[in-house]
Image: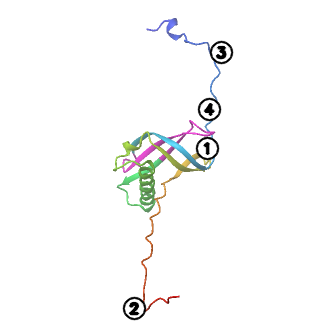
Amino acid sequence: MFNDDDFDLSFDPSAHVPQSRSFDPLPAGTYRFAVTSIKPKMISENTTRQFTVELTVSDGEHKGRKVWGRHSERTTRTDEGMQKSVAIGQDRLSELMIASGAKGSNLAAVVGCEVEAKIKVRPASGNFDASNDVVAYVVPAAPAAKQAAPAPTSKPGFMARKG
C-alpha cells in the first residue's frame, strides 16, 4: 500500500520549465542521423516482416529529433502492392547497410552508426497527422577508378621525321 509520501516529487514543479517538444514533421531534406535502434516486427496478419529503424538527427537546428523508417523485408503475400513494398523495403535496407559501412547482412551492426538519409513529408490524411518518410539512405559515392594512360600507338613502317 502507498502512503502520501510515496507521491512526493523530488523537485519543485513550479521552478521547472518543461522542454518544448515539437511533433511536427521535419522539413523535407537530407539529414545526418545516428541509428538509435532497429526493431523487427510482423505486420499484415503475420505475413510480412518489417524493420522499424529509429533515426536521431545528429546535428544542426533539429539535433535530437527522431524519424522512423519502416521497411518491409519479406512477405508471403503475392499481391502486387505488397511485392512492390518489399522491393522498396529491400532497397532501403541495402542502402542503410552500405551507407553505415556495416558488413554482412545483420542489421544489428547498424545500430550506433551515423548515416545520411533523405526524408520527405507525408501530408496529413484522414485521422493521421503529417509525418516524415525515409525515402533513401545516402550511399557514399564510390571513388572514381583511375584510368590508365593510353598505350602509345605506332603505325607499321612509319618513322618520325628528324628535324
Which label is found at residue 26?
A: 1
- Going from N to C along the chain, the mark reached first, 1 or 2, is 1
* Front disc: 1 or 2: 2
Of the two numbered discs 1 and 4 on the same chain, state the one appearing first in sequence.
4
Q: Which mark is residue 67?
A: none
Q: Which secondary structure, mark 3?
A: helix
Choose between 43 and 31: the one closer to the eye: 31
Q: Amino acid at mark 3?
A: Ala
The image shows residue 43 at horizontal and vertical percentages of 41, 47
Q: Which residue is labeled 2 in the image? A: 156
Q: Which residues are magenta?
A: 42-69
Coloration of the structure image: rainbow
Q: Would you say 74 lies left or right of 10 here?
A: left
Q: Are marks 3 and 1 in contact (CB under 8 Å)?
A: no
Residue beneath disc 4: 21
Residue drawn at (45%, 72%) of the image: 149
